[in-house]
Image: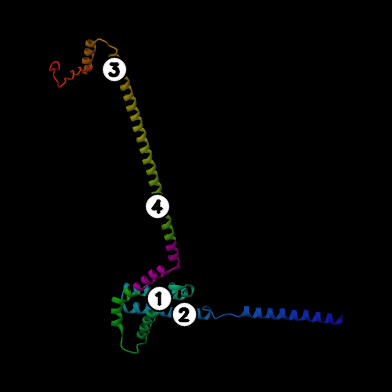
Amino acid sequence: MAKSLFEFGRAIERGAETERSTAELRAEVEKFDLAGTGGFLSAVKYLVFAILASLNFHLFYEHVPGVWGVALGCIALLFEACAVHFWNKQNKSAGAHKTALQAFAVVFTTTSFVHGCAALYQLSGVGPSLAEPIYNYSKYVAFPLLFGLMVLAVCVLHYLHWSTKISEARAAAQLETQQGRAELLTESVKLKDQVELEKARLESFRERLLLEQDYVSAIDQFAQVKARGQKALAAISDPETRRELYAMMGRVMEEPQQMKRISPLPAATTGSTDDGPKS
């Protein structure tokens, strides 16, 4: 009995130890944190892009006089903001849209980095001046390049966005629904036309039937009138009166055929003659 109680206590203790080990493992897993993109790296990223933005603005502002230099500097700042946006969103997308975000992020960053290096080279003054090439570049190439890349990025990313595919699917479904509805309406109109045509045919048949009934009734009346007239004429015994009535009615009186008497055939003659008494 004492041994059984001792084993039971040991089992309870082992269960408690197992629960403590499981809880410690769960706490260790919950405390484990993967490397993220925020925090220090995020601060460094924004600092680097801020330096590049200031160098880009300085490049165009210093080498292009007047309002045009300020406008190009502002476009360069917007270009830099687009690069930051692409880097921030590329890990929150998938498929072709993610690939496009990464490609535009690299292109925008590379272009901004080249501009920043040119501005830093001019500020350092360690070599020949690039004022004239930078001026020609800013006057003829910079605006079309930066603005064209931004327009291209907006169009491509909008086209590859997941909402565009959903909109296309909805449009296809609505198009199919509208086509089905149009076919249904067309079929309904066709059936109604067929019904109206059959009704018209039935009405025409009824009218022809009524007309034929009128024909039959008229023919019956005509036959009765003719029969009564023939009977009335046959009741007149006087041929002259009957002939006058026929003439009044425009008819020709038929003379009754008289039976011709057949005259008797002549008696047959014999071929022998009376030669007198025989001796």
State which tag comes first along the sequence, 1 or 4.
1
Q: Which residue is mark 1?
A: 104
Q: What is the span of residues highlighted in magenta in the rendered image?
A: 147-169
Quick one: label 2 or label 4, which is nearer the N terminus? 2
Which residue occupies the extreme right position in the image? 1
The disc, 1 or 3, on the residue closer to the chain's N-terminal end is: 1
Q: Quadrant of residue 192?
A: top left
* Label 1 to label 3: alpha-carbon separation: 115 Å
Which residue is tagged 2? 47
| Sequence-first disc among 3 and 4 | 4
Displayed quadrant of residue 241: top left
Q: What amino acid is at disc 2?
A: Leu
Q: Nearer the viewer, residue 256 or 108?
A: 256
Instruction: Please state which of the two labelled residues, at mark 1 or mark 4, is closer to the viewer.
Output: 4
Q: Which mark is residue 230?
A: 3
Judged left or right of residue 183, residue 44 is: right
The image's mark for residue 183 is 4
Residue positioned 36% across, 71% down in the render: 152
Depth check, front residue: 197 or 15: 197
Residue 151 colored in magenta in the image: yes
Label 3–label 4 contact, CB within 8 A: no
- Distance (Cα) linking label 1 and label 4: 46 Å
Q: Is residue 214 above or below residue 134?
A: above
Tell me if residue 202 can be seen.
Answer: yes
The residue under the point 43% across, 73% down is: 96
Label 3 element class? helix
Magenta highlight on residue 6? no
The color scheme shown is rainbow
Check the picture and name the quadrant holding the N terminus: bottom right
Magenta-highlighted stretch: main secondary structure? helix
**How far apart are the two marked residues, 2 and 4, measured between alpha carbons?**
62 Å
Question: What is the three-letter code of the residue carrying label 4?
Answer: Glu
